[in-house]
Each structure stands twice: as structure tokens, then as C-alpha cells.
Amino acid sequence: MAQSTTQAKPPAANPAEKPALKGVRSIPYVSITGEDGKQRHYETNAIPLLFHRACFGWRMYLGGPNRVVSLREVLTTSQPAEQVIAGPETEVSADKTKATTRMLETVQDGVLQRSWCIIPGDPPGTYTYDVSIDGEPRGEFVFCAIEVPDQNPNTDPRELSCPNKFNAVERAQPQPRKAS
């Protein structure tokens, strides 16, 4: 289950200390490219294993100004991946069930987010992301990756059975704003 809020820290006793953290809204999401080529977006933690069509990720609403933060993200899977595609910022365990990524990321408009796309060899089961920002634990996202034997690109993740699934909603694509 995604952590929906983070408790605010008590106000700093010393003005030189960091300001208190505000509550955070954290959301897991899945995007699927359908047969019609349109991308559909869902706030859900149920990932259909649709190779090269389904992507998933997390989004945290941190607030505050645009800034660069130090991110530590630890992915643990219940089964090993057949293949791992990772950059130099990611350390993968020998058994391919844990990947730790350390990098600088930009908080834009108060939001920090990351995502990945499903590739052949990604295992079914539980995917847990533990996220720390600037050395502070800030969120846990638990996804459920579910096999789709027929690779139907119109699979709706809201209809998948997942032991740790929360109620999912489809998100409308933002409409371009008209100049006034």
C-alpha cells in the first residue's frame, strides 16, 4: 500500500535548524498504451505485465520551491528479474531482487516522481519501493505485478486481482490550456 501521508515534524526549536516538513500526498500510478495508441493513466498499484506497453511509477507532492534533492530509492522484488537495465547510479544485488538507486532529482512545482516501463523478464509478484529524500525516509510504495498471458493491450488494471491492491481510478489526461 502506498503511504498516503507523512507526519509533519515538530517545528524547529532553533531557527538554524531545517523547517518542519509538511504532509505529503504520495500516489502510485500505472500508464498503459492501448491498441488504439492512446495512453491511459490510473492511480493504482496493480501493474499488468504488458511488455513495452505498461509503465508504472510513484509521485510525491512535497510542496515548496523547485529544487534539487538527494534521492535514495530501494526496489525489492519478491522474485528475481531475468534481466536488469540499470545506469551507473543503481547497484543491483547478485540475486537480482534488490536495486538501490542514489541520484540527484529535481522537485518541479512541488512534485517528485519516477517511473519505469515493463520489459520481458520482469517477474510477477510484489515490487516495493522505499524512498528517502535528503536522507529522510519519505515513502513506501508496494506494487503488485500481474501476468497477462495474452498481452492484451486493453487490459484495465482496475480489473486485476492483487492481494495488496487499493481502489484505483482512471485519470483524465490534462487538457491543454488555451491562451487568454
Image: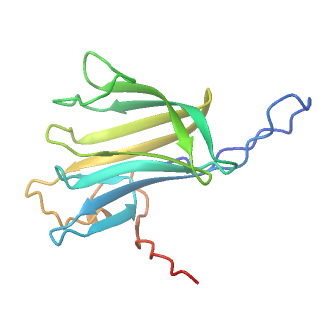
Residue 38's spot in the image, x, y percent?
A: 25, 70
Q: What residue lies at 65% left-to-right and 45% top-to-bottom?
A: 6
Q: What residue lies at 54% left-to-right and 80% top-to-bottom?
A: 179
Q: Residue furthest right?
A: 14
- The answer to whether 57 is drawn above or below residue 12 in the figure is below
Say whether residue 65 is left or right of residue 28: right
Residue 55's spot in the image, x, y percent?
A: 30, 51
Q: Which quadrant of the figure has residue 82?
A: top left
Q: Residue furthest left?
A: 150
Count of marks overlaid on the render:
0
The answer to whether residue 163 of the structure is visible from this angle is no
Name the image quarter holding the C terminus: bottom right
Residue 155's spot in the image, x, y percent?
A: 20, 65
Coloring applied to the structure: rainbow
Residue 14's spot in the image, x, y percent?
A: 92, 29
113 and 67: which one is in front? 67
28 and 15: which one is in front? 15
- The answer to whether 178 is drawn above or below residue 5 in the figure is below
Say whether residue 84 is left or right of residue 180: left
Q: Residue furthest bottom?
A: 180
- The answer to whether 40 is drawn above or below residue 23 in the figure is below
The answer to whether residue 20 of the structure is visible from this angle is yes
Q: Residue furthest front?
A: 179
68 and 137: which one is in front? 68
Q: What residue lies at 32% left-to-right and 47% top-to-bottom?
A: 144
